[in-house]
Image (cartoon, helix red, strand yellow):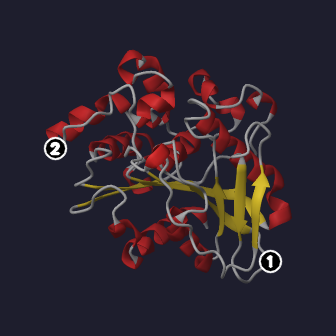
Amino acid sequence: MDKPDSPGGIFVLPEADISGIERKYLDLVYGSVSPLQKLDVYLPATGDGPFPVVMAIHGGAWMMCDKRDRQLVPMLSSLERGYAVVAVNYRLSAEAKFPAQIRDVKAAIRWVKNNGKAYMLDTGRIALWGGSAGAHLSMLAGLTSRPVKQLSQECAPLDDPDAAKQSLPGPIKAIVSWYGPTDFLMMDSYLAASGLGPCDHGAPDSPESRLLGVTIGEAPDMVRAANPERYISELAPPLFIQHGLKDSTVPYQHSLELARLARLAIGPERVFLELLEHAEHADPAFETAENLKKVMAFLDEFLC
């Protein structure tokens, strides 16, 4: 992931303009460990619900950015289609190491499922949507979201230790992944093979190493635990995957392999993969009206 280059190591994106959204509930608390454990709920302008839910998981190398910055803009477009949007903050890597981030996302999902009725949310129809680090967390959460009794032992570390006492009413229905990373140990070699290197994802101060709290080459078991591919099964929800072929931050081969494995598990008709020929990491091409129509068509098919 890109490193912040501003003073103090913090990169701040402009905020999304939410002033025109009348029905919204901001900074709802879903956890008690950190001030970052908050979420925002946005509702369509009309209707009594319950509304299907798009949960927006922000990117930022697991170390920066916010639920209300401009990364939220494409997700907010789903309000016009009758979806509610829930934007989630989670603990960043400077505060807590993996798996804190995925545990926070899962706690936010649990909050929606337990409290959604009060906010006109359809808790049985939830999709996760994220870019980059947000896509990584969306994939991890969505691929391990089935009821607790169905969770294999290898998924257990991704959830709160008390998760067995907090069974989920139902699984995530769909995942939208934009340029999300999977196998950290393959990032540099993939990028070099595509002529997009040199890269330093294996460095001690890389975002991936900071996330895990150890240089990734020294922690293959932790890297495996953080790899969404590990959790693909016949119970996986439908996946919408897009990646830019010119991405020099997260190699497009990650999305290729993810889609290949998912298609073997749940069938090609439930896995959409598109590689954008000229797109770089977080390219504006992902947010065009034409591309958002594709995302909305996917959500309409699998969430409605």
Image vertical order of residue 168 relative to residue 154, above or below: below
In the picture of the structure, the residue carrying the numbered disc 1 is 48
The residue under the point 67% across, 59% down is 125
Residue 255 pos. (x, y %): 34, 46
Q: Is residue 277 visible?
A: yes
Left or right position of 194 against 137: left
Residue 166 pos. (x, y %): 79, 35
Tell me, yes or no, whether the two marked residues, 2 and 1, touch with CB atoms within 8 Å: no
The front one of 84 and 131 is 131
Q: Is residue 226 visible?
A: no
Amino acid at circle 2: Ser
User: Which residue sits furthest front?
Assistant: 7
Q: Mark 1: few, some, or many residues within 10 Å (few <14, many ≥20)? A: few
Image quadrant of residue 257?
top left
The front one of 105 and 124 is 105
In the picture of the structure, the residue carrying the numbered disc 2 is 194
Dot in front, 2 or 1: 2
Left or right position of 270 against 117: left
